[in-house]
Image (spheres, rainbow, N blue to C red):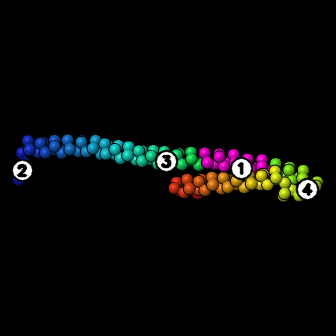
Amino acid sequence: MARSPERLSFFHAFAIVRVAMFPWDQIRSNAVRGVEALRRMSALFAERVAVESVVAKLLFRAQGLEERRGDLLRQLGERVYALQQGKDALRDGEVSVLVEEIRAVGEQIEALRQEIQEATKGSGRV
């Protein structure tokens, strides 16, 4: 069965228009998927930066406390050395105050380390 030339050209023109539109639809679809991927990656990056910021602040505070602890240990050593000449160093009031302060700072450092571990636990960082 032979088809008329007008009918062939109509179907042929329709097929050309449909094929010509398909790449634009595909480009748009790919662009939308790309934007969604960028949006997900930027959200993930922002979350990671927030976690890293919290960890950095906690590490900075822990470092300050460790320096304070070092100063207290130095003062304790100096006091014990000065007391070495005569009386019992462990019964001295200043020594016991320094020992208690060292313990308190050590507990604060340990609490900060726990906070750091909790903050990094959710982010997958070890």
Residue annotated with mark 3: 47
Q: Position of residue 20 (x, y in %)?
A: 24, 42
The reply, left or right, for residue 4 in relation to residue 67 is left
Assign the C terminus to one quadrant of the image: bottom right
* Magenta stretch holds residue 36: no
Q: Which residues are magenta?
A: 57-74
Q: Residues within 10 Å of mark 2 (few under 14, many from 20)?
A: few
Q: Which residue is mark 2?
A: 2
- Name the amino acid type tagged 3: Glu
Query: Which disc number belongs to residue 66?
Result: 1
- In percent of the image, x 49 and y 47: which residue is there? 47
Query: Counting other residues with Cα less than 10 Å from the Cα at mark 3, is it few (<14), some (14-19), or many (20 or more)?
Result: few
- The residue wearing badge 4 is 87
Measured from the top left, where is residue 55 in percent x and y?
59, 49
**Disc 2 residue type (three-letter):** Ala
**Vertical side of 20 occupied by 103: above or below:** below
Which is closer to the viewer, label 4 or label 1? Answer: 4
Q: Nearer the viewer, mark 3 or mark 1?
A: 1
The secondary structure type at the circle numbered 2 is loop
Element class at badge 4: loop
Picture quadrant of residue 4? top left
Distance from the alpha carbon under mark 1 to that under mark 2: 94 Å
- Mark sitting earlier along the chain (3/4): 3
Q: Are marks 1 and 2 in contact (CB under 8 Å)?
A: no
Q: Nearer the viewer, residue 94 or 116?
A: 94
